[in-house]
Amino acid sequence: MAHIGTSWPADLIPVGERAEVPPESPEALTLERGATLLSPKVDAVPDDGPELLRRLLPKGGHSLLAVPLFARGHLLGAVQLWRTERAESFNEDDARLLEEVGSRAALSVDNARRYTRERRTALALQHSLLAGAGTRTPAAETFGAYLPTATAAGIGGDWYDVIPLSSLRVALVIGDVVGHGLAASGTMGRLRTAVQALADLDLPPDELLTHVDDLVQRLPGDPDATASITGATCLYAEYDPASGHCRIASAGHPPPAVVDADGRSRFIDVDPGPPLGVGGMPFETADVALTPGSVLVLYSDGLVTGPDHDLDRGMRKLLENIDKTDVTHRELEGPGRNLLDAMGGASHDDDTTLLLARVHPLPAEDVVTWDLPSDPTCVKQAREFALRQLTTWGLDDLAFTTELVVSELVTNAFRYGGRGPIVVRLIRGDVLVCEVSDLSNTQPRLRRARSTDEGGRGLFLVAQLTHRWGSRYQQTGKTIWAEQAITNDTKVAGATAWSGLTG
């Protein structure tokens, strides 16, 4: 609504209030048919007339002109004009002019409606595919935030993720799909799912990005692929709280920053590698030792590219704002919000994603390792070492299950691991982790032994008595791991299962 005067008349319906026009009124029926309503002479509403008419008709209004807003076969509303101060009435020329204005306005309204609907859908899809804002694991506490751009470019394909890995490790992921709209959000969902699946296989960061790169190269060949999606960037960081080291690989993504426990910030030197979808080039892994309490800062380029698109200047500004924000002694959400506001947030012409992670290395007394010779005595030694350590930790209730797990995994390593030492490691966190490493690359296989078989039940028993188990490969050899939850219910269940199987 608009009024020629300096203020809106108090007796008229104010801007923003719904005008309940009777649908059976002649004016409404005329507009619904798509016809222009021209009433050169309109009688004034008496003071005792219907309240609705007195609130709809401006004081002194004597001539009415209204046209429907039609666009793409839909009636979106109407434009209504009243003449109050000028004595002459609306005529046919006025009606044709308003019809032209109305047709253009209707098309603009429908475009805005369609854009709003698509943006709302893309934003809902984007948020449904992202990880939660905050997570807590034994390895790290995190805070993540995603801010869509407010420009006409629309929702992009930025994402972040926090993935728990075996042996209390955690993966921190951040990525950015080239393009905007639903296609970018859909591609982001596919890439995030692929990264989660590959992370569950415990692949090294560089190998994981190689597999994701192959996937992106196959996307344009899909029948429903969108030409605007040409690639993506991604950074994958794997933090091990037992060693305090973080392995990072990047596919064309800006390097992460780290804030040491003393408050000093710096960028980590990571070879960015090519973006996903380029192919043909290897990815490099950087190994960084992090001190207790350090905070990793992962971000998308939307945070550091301002209107001038100067990435170097934006990264310098990011370090300056990190130094001004106390991220080492506060809960991460507050500094994260402050950092987004200081960097401009949603005012940028691209989506903005930020992921903060404060790492927590395990105390030295919570990790024990034994190197055992590859001979028949190694199984007995491993059991004795494990039982002694459980007593030291006060976890005697897990002794039965742990003794079985250690025996089976070390026996398999001795039989199939070839020559070389066998490494046994116990890790205490919110779960008890048992790891056995050998020099063989043979894939462990879970099978159900027949009643007449003399063996083949080892991994089956391990799978039944533990919370979860799996294997991962190093440059030389592999590690088989199993986790037991450290809770009273699990302790009782583990002891009961052992009694049933051995009795």
Image: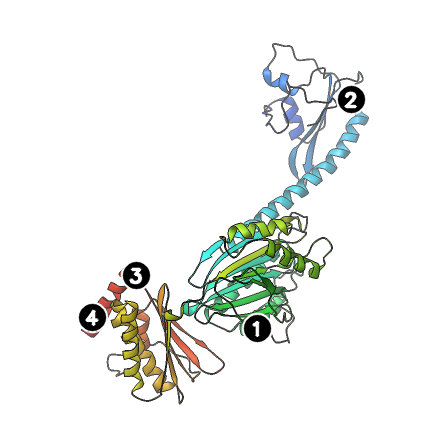
Label 3 neighbourhood size at 10 Å, few (<14), some (14-19), many (20+)? few
| Residue 87 horizontal/vertical position (percent) | 80, 16
Q: Nearer the viewer, mark 2 or mark 3?
A: 3
The answer to which image quadrant residue 488 occupies is bottom left
| Residue 90 horizontal/vertical position (percent) | 78, 22
Kindly report the distance in space between the C-alpha atoms of the residues bearing marks 3 and 1.
Answer: 36 Å
Colour mode?
A: rainbow
Kindly report the distance in space between the C-alpha atoms of the residues bearing marks 2 and 4.
Answer: 96 Å
Q: Is residue 253 left or right of residue 497?
A: right
Q: Which residue is mark 2?
A: 90
Q: Which residue is mark 4?
A: 499
Number of disc labels:
4
Question: What is the three-letter code of the residue carrying label 3?
Answer: Thr
Q: Which residue is mark 1?
A: 286
Q: Nearer the viewer, mark 2 or mark 4?
A: 4
Question: What is the three-letter code of the residue carrying label 1?
Answer: Ala
Q: Which residue is mark 3?
A: 487
Q: Counting residues from the N terminus, which is met first, the one under dot 2 or under dot 4?
A: 2
Kindly report the distance in space between the C-alpha atoms of the residues bearing marks 2 and 3.
Answer: 82 Å
Is residue 125 among the parts visible in the rendering?
A: no
